[in-house]
Image (cartoon, helix red, strand yellow):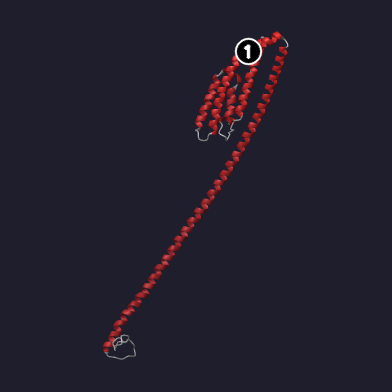
């Protein structure tokens, strides 16, 4: 039987002897084996060199990306700190501004209370004078007649004040509505000031300066959505104007009764 694991002509062992053909086969097969070994060594060196270059390139890229990320992070932290500092400064300014408004409103409220008390005292004095005049039949009748003649003027004054009240309600509603353009509110304010400059009653009551004070300082807004609950200073001025109209009515009636010219404020 043939032995394929050890054919007679494929023996490469150095100790085996044969004829010249056997040695030729040995050298013929040795050359390719040496060539493959040399190629494998060269390829291994080339591969290691490429791997080293690729690794070095990766390390450089990683270092560059890490540097960029670190720079970006530091810039982001600095920008965040700057934004926080600006926000804190703006908040402090707003708090100071709000405190200033609060003090101004408090001062204005005290002034209005003083004026209201003075008007109340004046009205009480007029009522007392009216009661004294009532003790004299003819004088009381004349005073009532004078007041009756002033009733028409009071009705007209009430209508004018009602129109200003409606305008102020709409203006304050526009001020409290963040979605409406600011120019709408400014147009309303300009129309009210023009009306106050042309209206004789407004001139008598000095309403133009009072309106400007309202536009500067009345910032109260109610969250219920009811327009008539907005505003604080404007309602105090409206009551003040109504009291002034009442006072002037009695002063004119008294002046008519006494035959003198009343002093209007």
Quarter of the image with the C terminus is top right
Residue 260 seen by the camera: no
| Residue nearer the viewer, 31 or 137 | 137
Circle 1 — which element? helix
Which residue is located at x 59 percent, y 17 percent? 155
- What is the count of numbered marks? 1
Which residue is located at x 55 percent, y 19 percent? 199
Where does the image place residue 126, in percent across and percent down from the top left? 69, 17
Quarter of the image with the N terminus is bottom left
Where does the image place residue 118, in percent across and percent down from the top left? 69, 22
Residue 123 seen by the camera: yes
Q: Residue furthest top?
A: 138
Q: Quadrant of residue 256?
A: top right
Question: Which residue lies under the disc numbered 1?
Answer: 148
Vertical placement of residue 122 versus 88, above or below: above
Q: Quadrant of residue 139?
A: top right
| Residue nearer the viewer, 215 or 171 | 171
| Residue nearer the viewer, 146 or 78 | 146
Where does the image place residue 237, in percent across and percent down from the top left? 61, 25
Where does the image place residue 55, in percent across and percent down from the top left? 43, 65
Which residue is located at x 58 percent, y 26 percent? 211
Which residue is located at x 41 percent, y 66 percent? 53
> Local crowd at mark 1 within 10 Å, few (<14), some, or many (≥20)?
few
Is residue 96 shown left or right of residue 181? Answer: right
Q: Quadrant of residue 220?
A: top right
């Amino acid at each position: 039987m043939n032995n394929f694991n050890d054919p007679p002509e494929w023996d490469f062992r150095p100790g085996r002897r044969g004829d010249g053909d056997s040695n030729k086969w040995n050298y013929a097969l040795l050359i390719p084996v040496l060539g493959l070994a040399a190629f494998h060594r060269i390829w291994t060196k080339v591969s290691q060199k490429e791997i080293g270059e690729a690794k070095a390139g990766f390390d450089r890229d990683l270092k560059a990306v890490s540097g960029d990320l670190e720079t970006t992070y530091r810039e982001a932290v600095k920008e965040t700190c700057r934004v926080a500092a600006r926000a804190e400064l703006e908040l402090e300014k707003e708090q100071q501004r709000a405190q200033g408004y609060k003090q101004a409103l408090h001062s204005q409220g005290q002034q209005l209370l003083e004026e209201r008390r003075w008007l109340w005292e004046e009205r009480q004095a007029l009522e007392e004078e009216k009661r004294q005049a009532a003790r004299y039949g003819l004088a009381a009748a004349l005073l009532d007649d004078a007041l009756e003649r002033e009733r028409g003027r009071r009705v007209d004054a009430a209508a004018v004040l009602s129109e200003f009240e409606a305008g102020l309600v709409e203006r304050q509603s526009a001020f409290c509505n963040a979605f409406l353009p600011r120019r709408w509110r400014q147009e309303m304010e300009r129309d009210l000031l023009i009306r106050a400059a042309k209206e004789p009653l407004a001139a008598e009551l000095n309403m133009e300066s009072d309106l400007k004070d309202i536009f500067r300082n009345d910032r109260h807004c109610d969250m219920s959505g009811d327009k008539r609950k907005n505003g604080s200073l404007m309602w105090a001025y409206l009551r003040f104007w109504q009291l002034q109209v009442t006072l002037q009515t009695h002063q004119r009636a008294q002046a008519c009764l006494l035959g003198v010219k009343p002093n209007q404020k």
